[in-house]
Image (spheres, rainbow, N blue to C red):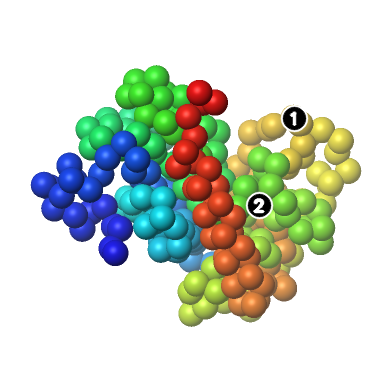
Amino acid sequence: MNRRYEELTGPEILDRICGSSTLLLPIGAVEQHGPHLPLAVDHIIAHETATAVVESVGEELDVWLLPTLSISKSNEHAWSPGTLWFSAATMMSILRDLGRAVASTGAERLVLLNGHGGNTTLLNTALRELRLEFGLKTFLVHPSVPPAYGGVSNASELGMGIHGGLNETSVFMHLRPDLVDLSKAERKVPEALADNQFVKFGGPVMFGWLSNDFDAAGYIGDPTGANTDLGKQLFEANVAHLGAQMSEIATFDFGR
């Protein structure tokens, strides 16, 4: 069964969307990823991942796919012409408006699937705001948790393959191989940070940064070894992992 929310008719919303339904909102970005990747990376990965998750578990768990929000808070890349971004205030307003609309459908659960690491802190804040104002049960998931927020990065990238690096480039190669140009890829890992105990990506002290603080190319990682086989493996593992997360989300009720 087609489980794309926007392809339902107005009357069908009240018949098909109910308290047991979970609405899944993919959130991506349109931002620079260096010379080897297009601006579309984050929103394509978010959209394709969410689509695959709904195809996998949508019928079983009553999950519906909302239209992908392709532009988000990407101002760490604002220095680069072509990046499209909302301010934090605008992004919060958009999420509030979407939450209000979702709450009117009867669905109790809203899941934000975030494909852009720069959104993570803001989206986590939005979860509580939407919970408070509209009574929704709200959740934040990722195709893979960003290394800057405790996710795994390859040892070869010293835990800092956070933007346009090996894994992200490989996944995108699996999804859109025609849009990747590895001949323009180089290693861009901020090696000096690896010696820090606290102030580093994934460390206990967070710090403000822009993507060109480390190198003018604006990507952070080592995409030179990216390949479609690794991308397929990562993508399929991410979809399976998210399916398991959605299963728990579908029955979550604060331990009552």
Q: Quadrant of the N terminus?
A: bottom left
Q: Mark 2 falls on what kind of element?
A: loop
- Residue beneath the point at 54% across and 60% down: 239
- Identify which amino acid the numbered label 1 is placed on: Val
Is residue 137 toward the left or the right of residue 156 in the image? left
The image shows residue 178, relative to residue 22, as above or below, that is: below
Along the line of sight, the residue nearer the viewer: 182 or 14 = 14
Farthest residue, direction left: 11
Seen from the viewer's position, the closer of residues 151 and 192 is 151
Which residue is at the far front?
256
N-terminal of the pair, mark 1 or mark 2, is: 2
Q: Which residue is mark 1?
A: 205
Residue at 54% from the left image edge and 26% from the top image edge: 255
> Residue 124 at x, y = what percent?
52, 32
Residue 188 position, x and y percent, is 72, 59
- In depth, the one of 108 and 221 nearer the eye is 108
Mark 2 is surrounded, within 10 Å at the Cα level, by few (under 14), some (14 to 19) or many (20 or more) other residues, namely many
From mark 1 to mark 2, how far is it between C-alphas? Answer: 16 Å
Helix, strand or loop at mark 1:
loop
The dot on residue 162 is: 2
Whether residue 244 is visible, yes or no, is yes
Question: Quick check: 219 left or right of 180?
Answer: right
* Foreground residue among 124 and 254: 254
Q: Is residue 155 left or right of residue 6?
A: right
- Residue 89 can be seen in this image: no
Q: Residues within 10 Å of mark 1 (few under 14, many from 20)?
A: few
